[in-house]
Image (cartoon, rainbow, N blue to C red):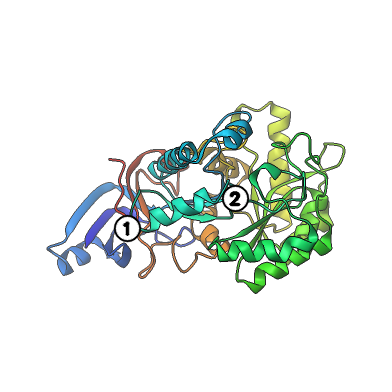
Amino acid sequence: MELVSGRRVVVDAERPPLDHAAVLVADGRVAAVGPTADLVAAHPDVTHRAFPDATVLPGLIDAHVHLAFDVTRDPVPALRDADHDALRTTIRTHAAAMLAAGITTVRDLGDRDGLVAAFRDDVAAGVVPGPRVLTAGAPLTPPGGHCWFLGGEVGRDGVRAAVAARAAAGLDVVKVMASGGMLTPAGPGIADVQFDLPTLRLVVEAAREVGLPVAVHAHGTASIAMAARAGADTIEHAGWYAPDGGRDLDDAVAELVAASGAVTVPTRFRGWPDWPAAERTAALARQRWADGHGVPVIVGNDAGAGQGRFDDLHDALTYYAAVGWTPAQVLAAATGRAADALGLGGVTGRLLPGLAADLIVVDGDPLTDLSALRCLRLVSTKWGYSPR
């Protein structure tokens, strides 16, 4: 057992923090949370890590990453040409960077040959340190479609078998490419629709039958609408692109998404403070528009694609703060709300008794200043990993 105490403990980002509190950890789980003095008195012999001026809070969740991708302008050649040993090293290196940055859960939405699933299993077995991992394996895409090189090409007649194979392989989520994307420039465009609505519905139906959620890659407004109508659990990127390359802020589609139960995972905000003023203003206004329609959001940064970094979720967090979210709302979208959306609400995302003791300690108070998240003092998971 171990006691971790701080000036404040954020049990749930959507609830007021506890002052001068501590978390009692036993066998990788939260055993109790309460006033430090009470827990010290009740457990005088346990190891006590005291951080008197710091904040203890749940570890961060990155809902959209690609651990096998190199952080370059074009990660495809290295991914396509590397052997398994090289890719295993890439995956381990990126996962270690994420954990050291306070990200204790990641959802990987596209790799090659099931290597991320193997890494996930090694982490769960305590063989290597790393964050908790959910993985989709190779995304479903039409022949020659977006990211076909990952090995997930499928026609409508093969959907059920492809989904069943993912369930049999122990994958955590089915990802399907409803639109094109920038990593496959010779394929469909970013706003182009790849699958028709009946096929997307078949993917969701087949996934439900084997108990898997569905993440739909959808950059364009047309594909976003299809994802919502098909019953997607999460809609990835959600860039609201029009066929002409502009943006299509369709109020009816936003309302459809909000009513569908799907959660969006926007990913385009890397380096946003340095964007040209007009581009930055338009991006923030798009998110405010989506917020105004009640479109749910969790945090993901597409690490590995488009030069998205694995060790830094802060561009995403500060972006939402600039939109007008409170720090508590931002933290909720990267902790408890993200856990709920990914089916992990009973596992992690909050510091509640019985949940995994995925926690971080930071100097200062991130509920008033998100930059405190850069001042890590401790990262703790079931495997006891700490960067210090």
Q: 261 or 168: which is nearer to us?
A: 168
Which residue reaches farthest left? 45
* SS for callout 2: loop
Q: 193 or 18: which is nearer to us?
A: 193
Which residue reaches farthest front? 83
Relative to 66, residue 204 above or below: below
Count of all numbered marks drawn on residues in the image: 2
Residue matched to label 1 = 19
Residue matched to label 2 = 109
Q: Is residue 147 visible?
A: no
Q: Is residue 265 visible?
A: yes
Q: Residue flagged by tag 1: what amino acid is it?
A: Asp
Disc on the earlier residue, 2 or 1: 1
Residue contact at pointers 2 and 1, CB within 8 angstroms: no
Relative to 276, residue 285 above or below: below
* SS for callout 1: strand
Residue 155 horizontal side relative to residue 115, left or right = right
Q: Residue flagged by tag 2: what amino acid is it?
A: Leu
The nearer-to-camera label among 2 and 1 is 2
Rendered location of residue 264, percent (x, y): 66, 54
Rendered location of residue 274, percent (x, y): 61, 26
Q: 221 or 203: which is nearer to us?
A: 203
Which residue reaches farthest right? 244
Could you classify mark 1 by the number of other residues whose Cα lies within 10 Å: few (under 14), some (14-19), or many (20 or more)?
some
Which image quarter holds the N terminus?
A: bottom left
